[in-house]
Amino acid sequence: DTEVTQTPKHLVMGMTNKKSLKCEQHMGHRAMYWYKQKAKKPPELMFVYSYEKLSINESVPSRFSPECPNSSLLNLHLHALQPEDSALYLCASSRDRFVGELFFGEGSRLTVL
Amino acid sequence: AQSVTQPDIHITVSEGASLELRCNYSYGATPYLFWYVQSPGQGLQLLLKYFSGDTLVQGIKGFEAEFKRSQSSFNLRKPSVHWSDAAEYFCAVGSSGGGADGLTFGKGTHLIIQP
């Protein structure tokens, strides 16, 4: 069982759609992350939210935009995606950005048509 | 810059046999080392971690790993594998001051269990 909950587990969207992925953690962690994982590849860091500050991997396109409504929620808004954005999107949290290991959710499988 | 090498892309092991997955890292100081396991379509689950202290680390599901500074290695072992161990295994290294988001993952080793 994971204490990082991601919804939805599966999402299919067209290139003109706007959708969101949601992530919630119940461990009181102070840092939350979004990773993108393509098949047979390791996860790639997209965003980090910690201490009310967002850090962005500069290679991530602007069609992905994170939002952190509070310290236990981290959403990922999707707009005008491309088929190559199809992947498993993993949310993770850690006790602190500078300490400890990552705890991952089960992921949201995104397919862009 | 830190890096992780998992030399074996695929490993096939018979059920009940022992297992060793290799991981070599590159980092100037004492690293933080992790092994994660991922079942198909699932998230990553932490098996074990090494921060300091005893170089032989025990994890969940009967796994252990040994940190060998002289060989820059952190190999994962299990004395007897079960069919449910079939999965993708990722080794990761983090710097002591780099934070959890400073983790560098290896490319993974796909474990196949033969009946």
Image (cartoon, rainbow, N blue to C red):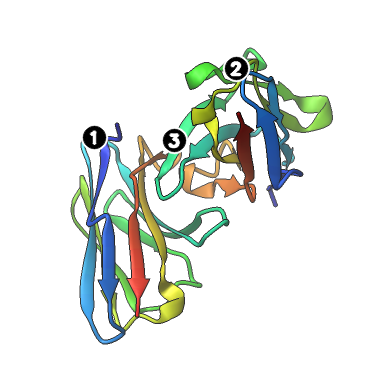
Tell me which label, 3 or 2, sits earlier in the chain. 3
In the displayed structure, B103 sits above or below A19; it is above
Q: Are marks 3 and 1 in contact (CB under 8 Å)?
A: no
Q: Position of residue B16 (x, y in %)?
A: 63, 18
Tell me which amino acid carries mark 1. Answer: Gly
Q: Residue tagged by mark 1?
A: A28
Instruction: Return the chain for callout 3.
Output: B
Circles 3 and 2 on the same chain: yes
How far is the residue under mark 3 from the one under mark 2?
16 Å
Residue that protrudes farthest toward the top in the picture:
B54
- Residue at horizontal 56 percent and vertical 53 percent from the top: A42
Q: Residue tagged by mark 2?
A: B57
Taking depth in this image into account, of A53 and B67 the one nearest to the observer is: B67
Q: On the image, which quarter does residue A19 sit in? A: bottom left
Circles 3 and 1 on the same chain: no
Tell me which amino acid carries mark 3. Answer: Gln
Q: Secondary structure at mark 2?
A: strand
Q: Residue tagged by mark 3?
A: B45
Q: Secondary structure at mark 3?
A: strand
How far is the residue under mark 1 from the one under mark 2?
26 Å
In this rendering, the label closer to the viewer, 3 or 1: 3
Is residue B23 toward the left or the right of residue A65 in the image? right
Residue that protrudes farthest toward the right in the picture:
B70
Circles 1 and 2 on the same chain: no
- Residue at horizontal 57 percent and vertical 33 percent from the top: B34
Q: On the image, which quarter does residue A109 sit in? A: bottom left
Q: Secondary structure at mark 1?
A: loop
Q: Are marks 1 and 2 in contact (CB under 8 Å)?
A: no
Q: Position of residue A105 (x, y in %)?
A: 33, 44
